[in-house]
Image: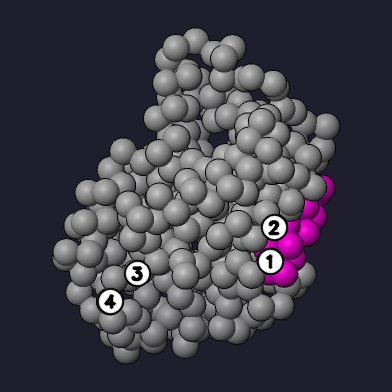
Amino acid sequence: MTDLSVLDLVPVREGSNVSEAIAEAGQLARVAEEAGYKRFWVAEHHASEGIAGGPTAVVISHIGHVTTTIRIGAGGIMLPNHNPFVIAEQFGALDALFPGRVDLGLGRAPGSAPIIGQALRKDLHRASEYFPQDVVELRALFTGDVDLPITATPGRGAKVEMWMLGSSLFGAQLAARLGLPYAFASHFAPTHLDEALRIYRQDFRPSDALERPHVMAAMGVMCAETDEEAELLSSSQDQAFVRLRTGEPGKLPPPIPNYRDTLPIQARAMLEGMDVARAVGSPATVREKIGRFIERTKADEIIVAGATHDPAARKESLKLTMESI
């Protein structure tokens, strides 16, 4: 059976705040753990009033304290925003707090407006060029490479499971070369999915961390009692995505009936382009769509993404999705 995991952006709902968003992420993680999901990942985003996961390691620590067995981690840390030594210390500390449970997914794209680079005191374009070297250095900080001039404490000896993330072919090539597990962001960028997985599997080199290729693919998933209810719930996520892509991001809005029908052709086509990695509907519909996606990708894991304005609906969606598989 293909494992299921959860990706959470820690959404801040309209009418809510950051404190409630982080508390709700912890509650969602507990539901995921009880339902049998393998991992609960938080993604790094900055300067968006609708996303509270920017201080990713801090949020992961909260998730770890309210759960006991589920793997926790970053999906991911955008390494050009940071230096490897600081990330080694942060995730070394997480491993010390929650041994054997911590994942570190690494992305190359800073995913931020230029002003974020200024705030971080980073030339993000230049930093992204050093991404492969930074990944190697970070791994060496964990393993305690004797050639490094400095030791990360915490960090050295930490059993953090490193992942390579990607939405293009670059991440697939680097994951294969370094022998790392690979997660593809097909829930929002499915265009290069098949070619990226082909390259990763074809070029994979075994490493001390991984003997054979291991693929995780992301899907937008929303499960409810009926197809109609699931589509209504999913309209909050659709609105958030359209607002983001049109330069008007904000807090997660309430659902709108038949939202896609109200959109201009270009916006509707943008959403429909992601439907190849989307499973929204009743348990039977979700089971069929996830099954076809697994058959297509041969993924070892599926990580489900999606947000609802009503936190209870997201919890119910996770339960129904797991029961349907």
- Name which residue lies at 55% across and 74% down: 102
Find out whether the residues at labels 2 and 1 contact each other: C-beta distance under 8 Å.
Answer: yes
Q: Which residue is mark 1?
A: 35
Q: Is tag 3's residue or tag 2's residue first in the polypeptide sequence?
A: 3
- Badge 2 marks a residue whose secondary structure is helix
- Badge 1 marks a residue whose secondary structure is helix
- Badge 3 marks a residue whose secondary structure is loop
Mark 4: few, some, or many residues within 10 Å (few <14, many ≥20)? some
- Name which residue lies at 47% across and 70% down: 1
Q: Which residue is mark 2?
A: 319
Mark 1 vs mark 3, foreground winner is: 1
- Give the magenta range: 19-35
Q: Which residue is mark 4?
A: 212
126 versus 95 height, above or below: above
Q: Is residue 135 left or right of residue 289?
A: left
Disc 1 versus disc 3: distance between alpha carbons? 23 Å
Mark 2: few, some, or many residues within 10 Å (few <14, many ≥20)? many
Task: Identify residue type, mark 1.
Answer: Ala
Q: Nearer the viewer, residue 219 or 48?
A: 219
Q: Nearer the viewer, residue 163 or 211?
A: 211
The disc at residue 282 is none
Percent position of residue 212, x then y = 28, 76
Disc 3 versus disc 4: distance between alpha carbons? 6 Å
Disc 2 versus disc 1: distance between alpha carbons? 6 Å
Disc 1 versus disc 4: distance between alpha carbons? 28 Å
Percent position of residue 171, x then y = 29, 55
- Name which residue lies at 46% across and 66% down: 2
Q: Which residue is mark 3?
A: 214
Query: Which quarter of the picture shows residue 68?
Result: bottom right
Mark 3: few, some, or many residues within 10 Å (few <14, many ≥20)? many
